Image (cartoon, rainbow, N blue to C red):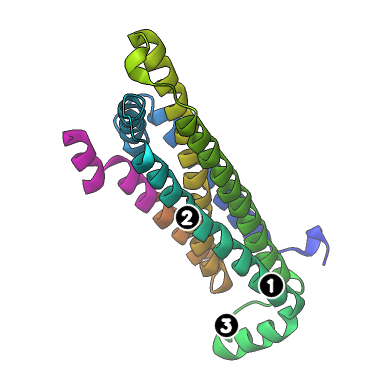
């Protein structure tokens, strides 16, 4: 199927999907510098954590916490790989899947190659999420190294102690951002599932996912609890 034969509405829907995803990412990143949100509050808490870590004699609790965060990210990275394997299998059996979908939802418009394109879009989303999760894992590992290499803060001047704590917190914060990008990809992949039913439903689901993420980032109860601490 050539691009000239590709349904124009599906091309618009894909452009809308990518625009909403990228647009929200840029919006959230810029907005986090201006108002209190989960990213802003957690950055403050990570800095406070590292400031306490550097003056603690026993840092086993800090190492254990980093290990827990790594396990959480590792679960999502492994899940992304399993989903990718399933999607690639589905891509190879797209003809059979199209037949099943036609029986379940006979109103679907099965243009040649469109189903493969939809599955391929999901593949690309989960490839992106896998790279983000694995990069998050590495950065948490860097944070663990910084904790292990932390000097005795009780013997350092306040300026040097704060500088080390801020740099360590920034590395861990970057790991959390990569994890957040991976999670965001998974959320938007759920909207992509609606594309297999109806292109308009796909576009609407994209907006719903956007609103859910915005509410959790800027208006959730968890944020209010963090602000009060």
Q: Looking at the rendered structure, which numbered label has been put on residue 107?
A: 3
68 displayed left or right of 186: left
Which of the two labelled residues, at mark 2 and mark 3, occupies the earlier sequence position?
Answer: 2
Say which quadrant the C terminus sits in.
top left
Label 2, on which residue?
Answer: 71
Residue 111 seen anywhere in this rendered image of the structure: no
Q: Between residue 188 and residue 171, name the one nearer to us.
A: 171
> Does dot 3 land on a helix, a strand or a loop?
loop
Mark 2 vs mark 3: give the one in front: 2
Marks 2 and 1, how far apart in space? 35 Å
Which of the two labelled residues, at mark 1 and mark 3, occupies the earlier sequence position?
Answer: 3
24 displayed left or right of 62: right
Which of the two labelled residues, at mark 2 and mark 1, occupies the earlier sequence position?
Answer: 2
Q: Between residue 186 and residue 18, name the one nearer to us.
A: 186
Among the 4 quarters of the image, the one containing residue 123: bottom right
Neighbour class for label 2 at 10 Å: few (<14), some, many (≥20)? few
Across and down, in percent, residue 206 comes to 47, 56
Q: Which residues are magenta?
A: 211-229
Residue 58 seen anywhere in this rendered image of the structure: yes
Across and down, in percent, residue 204 comes to 45, 59
Marks 2 and 3, how far apart in space? 44 Å
Say which quadrant the N terminus sits in.
bottom right
Across and down, in percent, residue 201 comes to 48, 66
Label 1, on which residue?
Answer: 115
Neighbour class for label 3 at 10 Å: few (<14), some, many (≥20)? few
Which residue appears at 65% of the width and 66% of the height? 84
């Amino acid at each position: 199927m050539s691009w000239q034969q590709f349904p124009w509405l599906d091309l618009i829907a894909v452009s809308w999907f990518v625009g909403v995803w990228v647009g929200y990412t840029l919006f959230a990143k810029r907005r986090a510098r201006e108002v209190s949100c989960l990213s802003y509050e957690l950055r403050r808490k990570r800095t406070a954590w590292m400031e306490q870590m550097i003056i603690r004699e026993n840092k086993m609790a800090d190492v254990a916490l980093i290990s827990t965060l790594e396990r959480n990210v590792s679960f999502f990275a492994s899940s992304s790989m399993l989903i990718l394997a399933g999607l690639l299998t589905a891509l190879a059996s797209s003809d059979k899947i199209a037949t099943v979908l036609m029986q379940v939802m006979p109103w679907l418009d099965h243009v040649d190659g469109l189903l493969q394109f939809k599955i391929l879009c999901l593949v690309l989303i989960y490839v992106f999420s896998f790279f983000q999760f694995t990069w998050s894992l590495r950065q948490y590992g860097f944070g663990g190294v910084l904790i292990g290499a932390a000097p005795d803060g009780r013997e350092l001047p306040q300026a040097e102690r704060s500088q080390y704590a801020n740099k360590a917190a920034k590395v861990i914060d970057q790991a959390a951002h990569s994890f957040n990008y991976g999670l965001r990809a998974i959320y938007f992949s759920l909207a992509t599932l609606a594309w297999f039913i109806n292109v308009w439903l796909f576009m609407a689901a994209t907006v719903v996912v956007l609103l859910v993420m915005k509410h959790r980032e800027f208006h959730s109860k968890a944020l209010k609890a963090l602000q009060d601490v």
